[in-house]
Amino acid sequence: MPHIAPTVLYVRLPVWKIWPGGVVYLADFIHKQRPEVRQEILDLALVAPGRRRARLRERIVELRPDVVAFSWRNMQTFGPHPENDALEVVMTFDHSPSLWRRARAALDATGIIWDYAAARLRNFGFIRLARRMLPDARLVVGGTAVSIFGKTIVRKCPTDTVVVIGEGEEALLSVVDGFNGCNPPAGHYWYRDAAGTITHRPADENFDLARLTAVDFPYIESIFPGFREYLDGTIGVHTKRGCPFMCHFCLYNKIEGDRQRYRDAAEVGKEVEMLSTVYGVKHIWFTDAQFCSTKRSTQHVEAILDEMVARRVKVRWTGYLRLNHLTPDIAAKMLATGLESVDLSFTGTQEVIDGLTLGYDLEQQMAAFRMFRDAGHTDQQIKLYMPLNAPGETPRTLGATIVRIRELYELFGRDNVLPFIFFIGVQPDTPIERQLIAEGYLPAGYDPLTLNPFIIKKLLYNPPPLGRMIGRAYLEAYGSRGSADDYVGRATMEILERELAAGAS
C-alpha cells in the first residue's frame, strides 16, 4: 500500500481578488478520492501584503503538512488587470503628444515592472520558505503561469518540487499517494529531485472530466477560511476542458489539449444550483476556454441550460462564447437562464479572422447576434474583444470593423455594446510568436519573462503604422472620460472612424 499523505496545504499565491476555482476543484477531487487526507486552503490574496509571510509561517507551524501545493496565476507584466492599467501606461508612453505625460508614463511603467519583479521574487520566497520549514515535505507548484512558464519556474524552485503543467488532478493525487523512482507522478510535469536534477514528463493522456462531480461546497467551506469572502462576487464554474481550435495567439489547446472533454451536465447543474440556493451566489462565470464552440460542445451547453431550467436556478451567468453552432432555441434558453453578457472575440473582416486562424465565419457570427435579438434580448451586454492591429490589419479592415460595430448598435442599442480595446499579447511557443520572430519584430532567443521595457511593449502587439492612430484615439477617449459620459471603447472606435475618414478625404 502506498503511503497516504495525511495533510495537504494549498497556498494560493497573491493575485487580485478572484475566485480560486482551480484550487477548489483540486481540493474537492482529492477529498473525494482520499477522504482521510486533511486539507486546508490558504488564499494569500485575502491576506494583507505585510502579513502574508507570517500567515504562511503560522499555517505551516500549525499543520506541518506533508504536501504544500502552490497555485501561481500570472507572471507577465504586459497583462492589464484590476491592480494596474498597463495598457493605458504603454499607450501614453508611446503615443501621448505631451512630453510630461510620457515621462510620467515611463515612471508608472517602471513601477509596474518593479511590482511584477518583486512579486516573482516574493512568490519564489514563499516556496523556499516552505522548503526551509519543511525539509522533508513534497512541494507542488501549478496554475496558469506555471502551465506557460514551467520550464523556467522549475529551475528556480527548491529541490523535491513537482511543477505541474495544465491539469493537476492526477499529478496531485499521485503526489498525495507518495510517488518514488519506480512510480513517478502522473500527468504533465517538470520535477526537480532531491539532487537538483530536472526531469520532464510530457502529457500523453487527458484527465477524465466525468470524474469531476459537483463540488462539495460545505466541505470546501470547512477547509477554506476565506470561502464566504467571494460569495458576493462572480464564482467560476468549469464545464469542459480542451480546445480544438488553433488561434495564432492562444495556448489553451496546448495546456488543456486539443480534444474537448466534458463534465456531466447534471453535475454542473447541481453545482450551480447549490451555489445559488445554499450560498446566495448571484453571478456565475463559466470558466472554459470557450463555453460553446463546436457542435458537440453547443449540445453540451444546451444540456446544462436544460438542467438550470429544470432546477429553477436564478443566477446571472456568462463566459467566453463562440457562436458557430447557435440555434434560435439555444439563444432563447441562454436568455431564459440568466445570460448576463455575450462575451466573444470580434473583428469585422473574414480575412483578419482567417489570418489569426480564429476558426469562425463572420456572417455566421452576425446571424447569431440576430438570433439573440429575435430571442428577446433586453439589457444583456455585447462585449466585443477586438484584436485591433493584429497582423494583416489595414485601414480598410479597421473601417470594416467599425461598420460592423455600428450594425450591432442598431441591433442591441448603443449602450449595450461594449467594444473592448484589446491587443494581442504575444505568448511563448505560439504561431504568432514564431511569425514575429521570423519577421524580425522580436529578437530570436528573447526571454518572454524579460523585464526589459522595450521588449515588454512589443509583447503587447500594436505596431506602426496603425499603432499610432489607435494609441492616440484610445488616449483621447481615455482622457475625456471625466467630461463625456461614454464607455472608452465606444469612444475610441468613433475617434478612429473620424481619423480614418479624415485620412481618406
Image: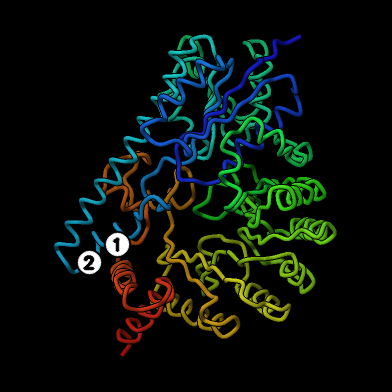
- Badge 1 marks a residue whose secondary structure is helix
Above or below, 296 against 208 in this view is: below
User: Which one is nearer the viewer's eye here, 326 or 352?
Assistant: 326
Q: Residue at point 53% right, 75% down?
A: 417
Q: Position of residue 311 (x, y in %)?
A: 83, 56
Q: Residue at point 63% right, 35% down?
A: 167
Q: Which residue is mark 2?
A: 96
At label 1, counting other C-alpha atoms closer than 10 Å, the crowd grade (few under 14, some 14-19, many 20 or more) is many
Q: Residue at point 43% right, 57% down?
A: 424
User: Which one is nearer the viewer's eye here, 314 or 20?
Assistant: 314
Q: Earlier in the sequence, mark 1 or mark 2?
A: 1
Q: Residue 9's image quarter?
A: top right
Above or below, 168 against 344 in this view is: above
Which residue type does callout 1 highlight?
Answer: Met
User: Which one is nearer the viewer's eye here, 199 or 476?
Assistant: 476
Disc count in the image? 2
Which residue type does callout 2 highlight?
Answer: Ser
Q: Residue at point 62% right, 54% down?
A: 285
* Quadrant assignment for the C terminus: bottom left
Q: Which label number is shown at residue 91?
A: 1
